Image (spheres, grey):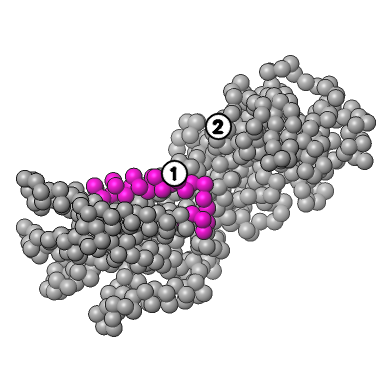
Amino acid sequence: MRTPAFLLIWLVIAAAVFAGSLAIGNDYVFFAGYVILQYVVLSTAWNILGGYCGYVNFGTGAFFALGAYSTVAIYKFIGDSELPHVIPIPVLMLVGGAVSGVVGLGMGYLTLRLRGAFFSIATLALAVVLETLVVNWDYVGGSRGAYVIRPEEMPLIGNYIRYLFLMMMLLSVASITIARLIEHSRLGYGFATIRDDELAAEASGVPTLRLKLIATTLSGALMGMAGAPFPYYIGFLQPDSTFGLDYAVNSIAMPLIGGTTSWVGPLIGALLLGTLQQVATVTISSAVNLLLVGVLLVVFVIVAPNGIVGLVRTYWQRKPEEFVGRRRVDADAPGSVP
Amino acid sequence: MNSIANGSPNTGLLQIDNLGKRFGGFVALENISLSVPAGERLGLIGPNGSGKSTLVNCICGTLRNEQGAVRFDGRKLDGLEAHQRTRLGLSRSFQLPRPFASLSLADNIRIPLLYTVAARGTIHSAREVDERCHHLLGEVGLEAKAQRLPRDLTQVEMRKLELARAMASLPKLLIADEAMAGLTHSEIEEILTLLSRLNDQGVTIILIEHIMRAVMSFSRRLVVLVSGKKIADGAPDAVMRDPEVERAYLG
């Protein structure tokens, strides 16, 4: 399927979901749906580096928070100026994405000689460094946190949360389109060789360094874009929760549960786990979320190490010649997850 | 030192001058000079640990040499990354096959096609890439397994895949690092036939090998490394009669 057709189908699906959510008539659907969509973007972004290239990033929270704090910085800046006070969310997303993308590029440069667990530890360290910087930056609230007032209404759409939901939905569609585009391009093949064997990749003419930098930049930028509207969603932004490990754990668990070798995996993982978490928050307690992730992750590592996508493929592989390896096929290990 | 068959300096396709490489206090290569003219079939032998693979790694850019210079096709290679050297037409196969485990055989071949040949602009359409993938797999007799994963291959098939992938970048020089280790007599013949055919098509080949029968039947020139030094360079028969080679290498 060509990319424009793919994009069109998903835009239609997005429109249908939005219409369906409106039909339910309760704005809580948008609050819950926003979080799930946010995880679709985060896990898809994580998967570009973690799944395609095999570099496990534990710093999702940092990139997400950079996007969020870019918005806070802009909010504070225009609050003190004569500029119109409502900034379109897409603009905030672009700014947040640019900031996180630049940091992603920087992280790529600093850590390019590291592999496996060492790379992961470095990303964790990056998150701690960035959090410390934000905690000590009074302009964006420092350790006290920052209030961002969400506008009440959005013309034509109604409650502002609907607008946030719609924007996150569009970003989700954009993310999976980008991920799929990568998979079917020369870049995707290059990423796969980095995951499999960097030395052999170089010997085959693949510029591994440049590709890794593309992956860290793109992955970081998408995470930042997902974080940019967050202050408007949450209303009160605190470094503790914004840099939280929840984002890192979820954005790793979701692709692993869904399957890391294709754009479908993170999407399925995020929808499944995200929905489960939202249901659990309402019916049991919000504290049970990470427990759910942990239990599911253990179950999947044992039952389906290549995620749901891998499970389905294995089932199909009973007719081997037709299904094995037209494109990439899951090898024994999911990426090179330590 | 024998120097029987040798082009004049700076005329070779591959020109190595006074190359030196250390690992801490250990001298892995010392003052290696070598000129390999286009079309050559060069055998490179030496005991384990004599520096053969280190030399290959220095030529291909996997390791950086501290001393000396490597020129390829009239160009200085110093400072160039491994993938840039591959794009210039310098290709290698690995001692232990290193296939891309999650990619099908066809996709394994597709990588160098996409990243070297297509990058040079000689292949344009996806169909051309597909055709070349299957042609190359056909040349090494693996076409029937094009959609399988490397883990489904036998030892000799793995070696063939390794060679096919090295050939896919349309190299001017192919360095085959122990491409026949662990193979049976008939399998060795298969690989040798493959390399000879490649050489007939104009590809210069450096064969690194422990199996003397294979080296002697393939090479037109033989270089011997011992403890990081080149101790002989010349026609295979003459080199094998060299007393220094007999003493240091064959015992």
Taking the image as drawn, is residue A47 in sight? Answer: no
The chain holding disc 1 is: A
Magenta part, dominant SS = helix
Taking the image as drawn, is residue A277 in sight? Answer: yes
Quick check: do tags 2 and 1 share a chain?
no
| Residue found 54% across the figure and 69% down from its top | A318
Q: Amino acid at mark 2?
A: Leu
Magenta part of the protein: which range?
A93-120
Q: Is residue A319 left or right of residue A42?
A: right
Residue situated in front as seen by the camera: B106 or A289 = A289
- On the image, the x and y values in percent for residue B107 come to 53, 49
Residue identified by numbered label 1: A109
- On the image, the x and y values in percent for residue B183 come to 78, 50
Callout 2: few (<14), some (14-19), or many (20+) C-alpha neighbours within 10 Å? few
* SS type, badge 1: helix
> Residue B238 in magenta?
no
- On the image, the x and y values in percent for residue A86 come to 10, 52
Q: Which numbered circle lies on residue B80?
A: 2
Q: Is residue B101 left or right of residue A230?
A: right
The chain holding disc 2 is: B
Does A293 appear above or below B38?
A: below
- Quadrant in the rendering for residue B17: top right
